[in-house]
Amino acid sequence: MKLPRAIASVNGKKSPLEDATIPILDRGFLFGDAVYEVIRVYQGRLWRGGEHFQRLRNSLQAARTSDIDMDGLANQVLDTIRVGAFTEAIAYIQITRGTAPRKHAFPQDTPPNVVYFVQEFADPYVEQRARGAAVLTQPDLRWQRCDIKSTNLLANVLAMQAAVEAGCIEAILYRPDGTLTEGTHTSFFGVRDGVLLTTPTSPAISPGITRQLVLQLSERTRIPVCEHSLTRDDLPRVSELFLTGTTTEVLPIVRVDDLRIGDGTPGPITRRLQQAYRDDIREFLAH
Amino acid sequence: MKLPRAIASVNGKKSPLEDATIPILDRGFLFGDAVYEVIRVYQGRLWRGGEHFQRLRNSLQAARTSDIDMDGLANQVLDTIRVGAFTEAIAYIQITRGTAPRKHAFPQDTPPNVVYFVQEFADPYVEQRARGAAVLTQPDLRWQRCDIKSTNLLANVLAMQAAVEAGCIEAILYRPDGTLTEGTHTSFFGVRDGVLLTTPTSPAISPGITRQLVLQLSERTRIPVCEHSLTRDDLPRVSELFLTGTTTEVLPIVRVDDLRIGDGTPGPITRRLQQAYRDDIREFLAH
């Protein structure tokens, strides 16, 4: 296994990522009884850290996992970034319901396990952000609380693998009625009749932090926007489509399955939002 | 953490269960990208071992995880039972898609991680099997491939915790249309108009091995039986109800939420099947 440079922490114990272990009785391992976040580090700084730690707290609450010292955790992560001299990186954080004998119900008096790692990140999407990429649609087989960012990700894994095998960058998931929900690890937006549309927040999707920022940037740049679900049948009438996500940022989609979107190149609204997104990061880094 | 005596194996490396660890980059830990089995050990022998290992293979195939040497694994587990002199025990087996950098799509050339433990088991259900127990109904929020015995169990955990907090032994899950599917870690049967009913196998439920045996025992003991789903609305017309499972065996349910089932004691069909189940185990152990 070849890894980018990375430092891990398991309940405060630091090690190279590949050496970090967790007991097999950890409930994250046995039950997927865990929630997580991925935060982008630009120039050594946590991008949208506050929102990510708040969402982590929301996930913990929704999963009824004990709260943790979130400020303390944020400081630990920042310390690891500093000590490791990370500049372009991701911080992955996972909190589990702790280590306990295997029984479905919550263990008593068991502290959560707090795991994170900071890993160098070489942006793999530079070319796709310029030219656009293809996605595959796949049935959305996930559970009904996708608003909880849990590690129950086997449905996401299988859909993403199908996408990769089809030469696509991501799978966009759809419900039995044809409603498109989101990607396996991204949100998505479409432009129909000049209006930017994205799936409304609900238990069916993850409340994407980049998604939320893009909604704000749309308003700031006077792009008409509406939180409204697209369906598979809408796709032929969509002039632009793009993904959003922590590492994906704003990434144009120019093909869905066998369907070309627009003229097959990134559209003007997507371009404006990509620019606005980069400007927002630049502004953040300037202060 | 106080544990019953247990020996674990992680890719062949044996240790006391509480000392066994797995890398945090294991995909079971990060993605719930893992399948599992729990096998009951009676008098040092694996009960229905063949069926469990076959189901494990089915889960691996459905999750597109590489197959493993299943006979070799079975022999390892049996060896651990013998070396550890386990008599009444459970064998827990979990296979993950291996250790790899965190990316949703399958890693290349990564062997699965094979984890198991054998643990002493003191049957906790003796009294409930005699007197009957209460269950709680809960919405079925799980994903749509519950036929894959994966570790994506957060929905099960949350429903089971609600049951425990209501003083119940298990949660029975229902779909939005009121159809009852199964328990969080058990199957269930009901008797309506003298006919034994249980949810038909489909991607919505786990293909329970005890469930399958009880279907066979019903035929052998001339109990009319039909694979047909019950709904919440059927419950007032159900004269008997029981759970089945590897450690649960056949366990009478005498209350669902606030509703008493039958006369509030285990019914005659349940009793016959409990006896037939014990007889089947006794016959197995005699040979």
Image (cartoon, coloured by chain):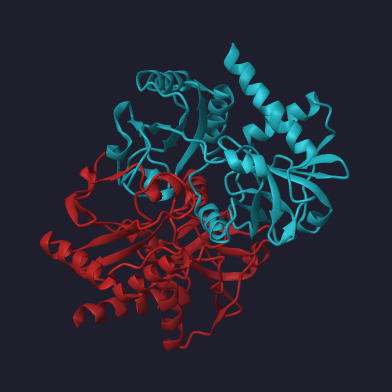
Chain colours: A cyan, B red
Residue B88: quadrant of the picture: bottom left
**Left or right, residue B157 beside residue A212:** left
Closer-to-camera residue (B16/A109): B16
Residue B150: quadrant of the picture: bottom left
Answer whether residue A95 is visible to the viewer in this image: yes
Residue at left 59%, top 25%? A51
Q: Position of residue A52 (x, y in %)?
A: 55, 28
Residue at left 65%, top 26%? A278
Residue at left 67%, top 28%? A277
**Left or right, residue A141 beside residue B129:** right
Outermost residue on the top side: it is A287
Location of the C terminus of chain A (image quadrant): top right
Residue at left 19%, top 65%? B76
Closer-to-camera residue (A188/B244): A188
Answer whether residue B139 is visible to the viewer in this image: no
The count of marks equals: 0
Q: Where is residue B261 in the image (x, y as percent from the top left)?
A: 56, 64
Outermost residue on the right side: it is A193
Look at the picture and state if B265 lies above or below A59. Answer: below
Residue B129: quadrant of the picture: bottom left
Q: Position of residue B146 (x, y in %)?
A: 52, 62
Q: Where is residue A174 in the image (x, y as percent from the top left)?
A: 68, 56
